[in-house]
Image (cartoon, coloured by chain):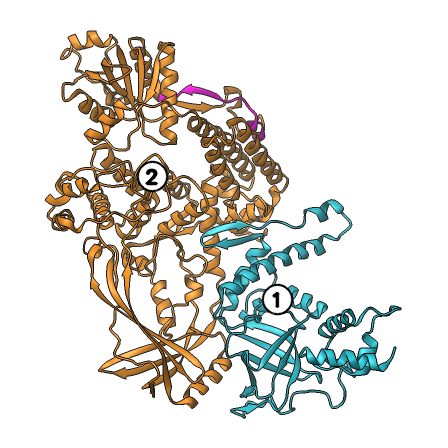
Amino acid sequence: MRVLCVAEKPSIAKAVAGHLSGGQVQSVSLKSHIGPSAAMLNIGLLTHAQHNTPEKYIKNYVFEYDFGHPWGRCHVTMTSVLGHITSAVFPPEYKRWDHPPPDRLFDAPVNVIIAEDKTKVADNIEKQARYANALCIWTDCDREGEHIGYEICEAARKGNRTLDIKRAKFSNIERAHILNAARNLIDLDHKQVNAVSSRIELDLRIGYAFTRFLTTNLRTLGGPFEKLVLSYGSCQFPTLGFVVDRYFRVRNFKPEPFWSIKVMHKREGMDVNFSWSRTRLFDRASTIVLYERCLAAKMAKVTKVQEKPTKKWKPLPLTTVELQKMATIFLHMTGQQAMEAAENLYNKGFISYPRTETDRFDSGMNLRALVQKQTQSNSWGEFAQNLVNGGFQQPRQGRNDDKAHPPIHPITYVAPTALSDKEKKIYEFVVRRFLACCSEDAKGVATDVDILYGEESFHAHGVVVLERNYLDVYIYDKWTGTAQLPKFTVGETFEPTEALMTEGKTAPPNYLTEADLIALMDANGIGTDATMAEHIQKIQDREYVCAVPRTARAADGEDDDEGAPTGRGGGSRGGRGGRGRGARSGGSTVGGRGGVKEFIPTKLGVALIEGFDRMNFETSLGKPFLRKEMELKMKAICEGRTTKEAVLNESIRQYRQVYLQSQEKLNILKAACRQYVLQQNGG
Amino acid sequence: MSSELQAQIRTTLQNQGLPVPSLTWIQSAMPNRNPLPPLPALVATIKTRLLAADLTTPNLFESPPPALPSNLGNPEVKEAKLPRDVPVQVLDIENLSKSKWDQVEELEAIARGEQTRGREIIRLPTGNEEDEDGGAVSQNASATTGRNAAVNANVANAAAAARNATHRLVLQDCKGQKVHGLELKRIDRIGIGSLNIGEKMVLKRGATVARGIVLLEPATCTVLGGKVDAWHRAWMDGRLARLKEAVGADARG
């Protein structure tokens, strides 16, 4: 029996071929137009690679492998594609931008063709399929990978209609894992294929229609618009919308004064600061009245003293979104750079598949063995050794499981010298995160003292760290602000050393950082964990937003709040844009302030979002709702709750509706462009 | 109708801890039905009308009316105690724990039909659709109802979230005298959206008045309920503009 194996990219083909063949592999360059058995005979004669064409990267590996039941021992040819091989296009009569009108693209025919630069890749598969009885897909196990698998099937069927088709399920290219996958082949999941082809078709129709609509209609405004292509994407615009929304929140912000009461008491040589249970009030007179009554009372009474063990939880297993957020905060990388580096590390077999939503390890995984591999490191080897020697703890279980991949974790140890600068940083982060997960929570003792001073309650909190545990390896988390409190006894009264009324001022929120933006996209269903970084990059490439280093503005804000114990504009700064799941420690965003960049929209970006927002509130393209619905529908297709046809019908109808409304209210968009970009008073 | 019946009603109201209206007012508030409903229903009707009334209505109370001492608002007086129980009505409520701008942003988001849950932006259900089909209702009115429903829903959440909030009220007695009330201890019913404008309260004898501000706490302040519809609506509709004006923002919506 002859089996054709096809991976998503050459590095995976090479690694899988290496494992399956046990090293007995022959490689043949793609130029070979002869069958595999002939190729085996002619090895050495066919080693010349072609240059300046993409397929120069592709090799066919020939070897023997026993798949077990039902295929048994086979002659195997292993090759790969380079990502997608097909693309969806409109027929030539839709080439012109002005005619037929762009909204015709909502129901124009869509042809799926072999992409121009992939014809040789597809030819290779078609030819190899002729000699094969079976096809085994080795694309990455996610939605896109499933669709690429389907494209490979189609290409192979052109050469051979009778192929038996299977798929290997794997999430890293470690040897035992690959051998296990080869022995447990499954079927291609056509639901996922359908979800992706719906997404591709919708992106094509919606993207083309709106890009042409925007570009041709706004061109008449003249000035910079004359030569501009205004690209629209159903993820890009909501992403831009978040940036613009925050921009206006910063710009429109009105600072307000607030007042507070701060009580300090000296005891055992320590200054104990008590914070007011009301935190702060936005009214001076009310605060004065309450403050005066504190002073009149003279004595404060201790109402509660509690000492109890406390923990700082170790992090959850690593997901893609979390990796990107952390990389932008601590590793001075963009989300996209982080993903590229992670992808390289995966292709080289050093880490598991970096696109995953899963934050829980399967209980069947041998995590200790993975920890063991890290013991040889100079930096964290000792920590890993301690885990191996009995410190190992099962990681925390998050709530997300995409059922396809485990959390991102190291597969083998690699010396830092073998890696590029960015790969090194990402690898180190992945390993430290993994070891932290397998370690123990940090432990300490928290002391809480409540006092009643007059009628007002105040609170002091102290923490003493007893065991650092995971913090020793996970250098990105800090557990500071730890202070010991002197002894207080319930019922005792004392006269506070100092009681002050303080004044502060609220500060505006910060502009969005990439980590903020990723978190917003994640919470609002914009893009998938794998594509978010691309969308963020794209709105920069389109010059809708620019990334600028955070200015001294943040420092100013701190000065403003000085003297306010609870200060920092709490509600206003953290507020609704603030932190949600994932970032438990308030200190996390502060740690890497040095190189933090913020996104500020360009005039063009503001004009586009404002234009759409002003047109129509329900379904503005600048809001996440429509796109979120689409992502949910993709999920529904994958779960078999709806069909591709139903989704296409419904989504196209929705977007066509928005298109017609936009056309009707085009003047509003134009006015916004005049106002913001051309600086005319058109608004 | 015998005045005995009105006296009976008055006693029942008194036993329920409500301020005691004059017999004349009870007479005027009696339902115009014959035969009259049974006593419990009658008392309920009168109670509802009392709580919905403007306390400054002439002759609502017997003379001398239960008013605040006239020098109560004097900021020179560090501390005084209220000499008697005084019924008051709520004219205004402010959340002093939250910046006005935060409240503005929240109201504006609701006006756009959005609300945030953590980082997630949620589209609020629109209540206007039937109205548009009906066509009879003016668009403005329907938009306002839809929005108010949203405001109320949101406000309920906010009130639950802000358990430690400190509110300041503007209270008015039957003579029309106004005084500030500051929440010294949390009173659960006090909250924007949960406490109505025109709602009635009793400030009890012995309540502390500091620098002309009545300090509210559960022991000396009873919330009776009620609402003056017109005032409440006007207050809700004008809230965003008032907040914006207070922080010096452009108030043109």
Above or below, comparing residue B19 to residue A121 in the picture:
below
Colour assignment, chain A: orange
Quote the CA–CA distance across marks 1 and 2.
46 Å
Helix, strand or loop status at disc 1: helix
Q: Which amino acid, mark 2? A: Thr
**Which mark is drawn over residue A356?**
2
Name the spot of residue A567 as percent of width and height, x first. Answer: 38, 71
* Residue A232 makes an appearance in the image: no
Image quadrant assignment for residue A220: top right
In the image, the chain rendered in cyan is B
- Do the numbered discs 1 and 2 sit on residues whose CB atoms are within 8 Å? no
- The answer to whether marks 1 and 2 sit on the same chain is no
Q: Which residue is drawn at 73% across and 73% down?
A: B47
Q: Residue B23 appears at what percent x and percent y?
A: 80, 82
A112 part of magenta stretch: yes
| Image: A45 above or below A332 | above
Q: Residue A503 carries which label?
A: none
On the image, the x and y values in percent for residue A532 come to 39, 41
- Residue A172 can be seen, yes or no: yes
Looking at the image, residue A146 sits to the left or right of residue B124; the answer is left
Where residue A391 appears, as percent x and y from the top left, is 17, 51
Crowd class of label 2 (few under 14; some 14 to 19; many from 20; radius 10 Å): many
Residue at (54% x, 87% y) in the render: B208
Determine whether the residue tagged by mark 2 lies in a helix, strand or loop: loop
Chain of the residue on which disc 2 is drawn: A
In the visual, does A364 lie left or right of B87? left
Please name the amino acid that badge 1 sits on. Arg
Task: Identify the disc placed on residue B239.
Answer: 1
Relative height, residue A312 to residue B24 (above, below): above
Which contiguous range is marked in magenta? A103-117
